[in-house]
Image (tube, rainbow, N blue to C red):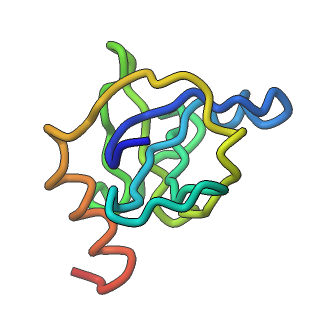
Amino acid sequence: MSQFCVYLNADVASRRSIPCWLNVQSDLIDTAESRVVVPLIAPERGRPSVASLMPTLTVAGRPLVMDTAQITNVPMQMLGRRLADLSADRLIIIGALDFLTHGI
C-alpha cells in the first residue's frame, strides 16, 4: 500500500458516498491492520468551501474531491483494488493536510 495511491472502497455499504480512499499514511509506517486515508467523494456530494482544504483530484479520468476534514483510518479489508497513483499531486495533497492541521 503506497502513500498517495487511491483505492476503491471495498465496503459496499459506504461505497456510494465514498467511492475511493486516498492513502496518506507514510510508507515508513507499515502497520498490517489499517491505513490512514482521506475519503475521495464526488464533487456534487461535497462542494469545497475552501479549495485548498478540499482540492479536486483526477482519478482514472474522473474528478473527485479530497474530503480532508474526514481523514480517518480504515481496516485494510476496506481498501479494494488500486485505481491510481497520485504522487504527482503530492504538493496539493500535503497542502490540504497542512491546511487541516495547521491552518496554512
The x and y percentages for residue 49 are 41, 59
Side of 23 where 95 appears, left or right: left
Q: Residue furthest right?
A: 13
Question: Which residue shows up at 46% across the image and 59% down it?
Answer: 30
Q: Residue furthest top?
A: 61
Question: Which residue shows up at 50% across the image and 40% down it?
Answer: 40
Question: Which residue shows up at 38% across the image and 75% down it?
Answer: 100
Side of 103 where 76 appears, left or right: right
Residue 14 lies in what quarter of the image? Answer: top right
Q: Observer-nearest residue: 82 or 46? A: 82
The x and y percentages for residue 41 are 54, 38
Q: Observer-nearest residue: 100 or 46? A: 100
Q: Observer-nearest residue: 39 or 76? A: 76
Side of 25 where 31 appears, left or right: right
Quadrant housing the N terminus: top left
Residue 95 lies in what quarter of the image? Answer: bottom left
Quadrant housing the C terminus: bottom left
Q: Residue furthest bottom?
A: 102
User: For the image shown, how many numbered marks are present on the structure?
Assistant: 0
Question: Which residue shows up at 70% across the image and 39% down it?
Answer: 78
The x and y percentages for residue 90 are 18, 50
Q: Is 84 placed above or below 27 here?
A: above
The x and y percentages for residue 38 are 50, 53
